[in-house]
Image (cartoon, rainbow, N blue to C red):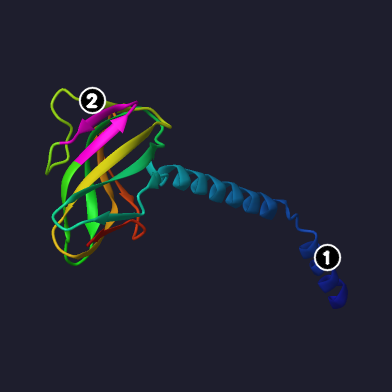
Amino acid sequence: MTNQGRDRAAQNRGSVPRIPWIWLVAGALVLVAIVALVWQTQTRAAFVLQDGEEELLVLIRNDASGIYQVQYRGRQPVQLQWIKPMLAGQILHVDVREVAVSKDSAEVVLEQPAGTLPEAQEISLQPGDVFNIRVTVRGQSIGGNYLYGFRIGYQDGGGEQTFELVMDFDYAIIVE
């Protein structure tokens, strides 16, 4: 009888419905998918570099300009407030002389050193809009720097936001 009791207990354990485990696994997969979707939408880049001068050659004590095409990929219209170029390198061999933004064939020169739009100037961006940033630099000493990216300030209805468009070390500025 003891063998029969063990066999029945083993059969009863084997016949335990596995449906709750299936629901738990399915629920966990749905939860992981929702978390991944929310994370992806929250970390989506608002601005993306599409094109630009990969190697800008500047003669010492002269000016040279590079044009960088940027697309706005946000979800709602925004007002551009300011743009600041970020230069990388231990020693800065160039000075930023001028930053200008052009959209729809209209160019606005930003006030330096803050990089803000002049009073009464507005640049509105809709999702998908493309605009150009022209950076003019002056060569101060022989060497090289990188245009590491742009710090972009914009108004999105909920207050001023800052986005760092990082281009790494792909865009060199060489002074000869």
The question of residue 108 being in magenta is answered with yes
Proximity of marks 2 and 1: CB atoms separated by less than 8 Å = no
How crowded pointer 2 is (Cα within 10 Å; few <14, some 14-19, many 20+) is rated as few
Q: Is residue 19 above or below residue 67?
A: below
Q: Is residue 9 left or right of residue 143?
A: right
Residue 122: mark: 2
Image coordinates of residue 8 in percent, x first then y, are 84, 67
Is the stretch drawn in magenta largely helix, strand or loop? strand
* Secondary element at tag 1: helix
Image coordinates of residue 37 in percent, x first then y, are 51, 44
Q: Which one is nearer the viewer's eye here, 142 or 42?
A: 142
Q: Quadrant of the N terminus?
A: bottom right
- Label 2 vs label 1: CA separation? 76 Å
Image coordinates of residue 124 in percent, x first then y, are 30, 26
- Extent of the magenta region: 99-110
Q: Is residue 99 visible?
A: yes
Q: Amino acid at mark 1?
A: Gln
Q: Quadrant of residue 139?
A: bottom left
Q: Is residue 46 visible?
A: no
Q: Quadrant of the C terminus?
A: bottom left
Query: Which residue lies under the disc numbered 1?
Result: 11
Q: Is residue 123 above or below residue 66?
A: above
Image coordinates of residue 154 in percent, x first then y, are 26, 35
Sequence-first disc among 2 and 1: 1
